[in-house]
Image: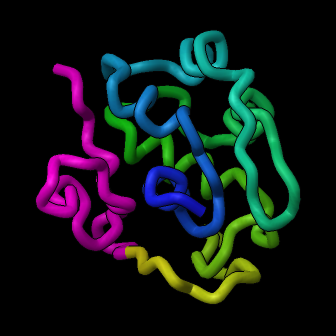
Amino acid sequence: MTDEQDSNTVYGVAFGPLKPALREHSYPVTRSELIEQYGGFELEHADGSDRLSAVLQEADAATFRDPRQVRDAVLDALEPAAVEGRSSPDGSEGTGDGREEHDDAHGEEPGDGSDDGGDGTDGPGDWSQTSV
């Protein structure tokens, strides 16, 4: 897996080119707007793959303020077996090894917003919005 692929993978869910697209998107945004624009993107995970449209249909939120909320809604909507090492809202754990940590108190991964590896590249924990 390349560094770029690593930075677009969270808890074993590969967001691929969707991650930078979500970071550049203008917020707030509705679920239906995201489905219309990005619904065809495939999310690869430990249990196979799913289209973003199908995953977002299962999400509780109807509106998102930033890319982190979209990421969290996707992770919450996927089956626990698809997400590696993350506690789901019902308290069950995914099947993975827990390589990435999650700060449930803040809904962010360690380094969120500033984990750019010092060279301006997107770090794995950086889901901050890049557009204003």
Q: Residue furthest bottom?
A: 97
Q: In terms of depth relative to the viewer, which is nearer, 63 or 7?
A: 7
Drawn side of residue 99 relative to residue 125, left or right = right
In this figure, which colouring scheme has been used for the structure?
rainbow
Q: Residue furthest front?
A: 2
Q: Which of the 4 quarters of the picture holds residue 102?
A: bottom left
Indicate whether 120 appears above or below 29: below
Q: Residue at x 61, y 42 (%)?
A: 60
Quadrant housing the C terminus: top left
Q: Is residue 114 magenta?
A: yes
Residue 42 position in % (x across, y down): 74, 36
Q: How many marks?
A: 0
Magenta segment boundaries in residue numbering? 103-132
Residue 56 position in % (x across, y down): 68, 34
Residue 117 position in % (x across, y down): 20, 63
Q: Which of the 4 quarters of the picture holds residue 93?
A: bottom right
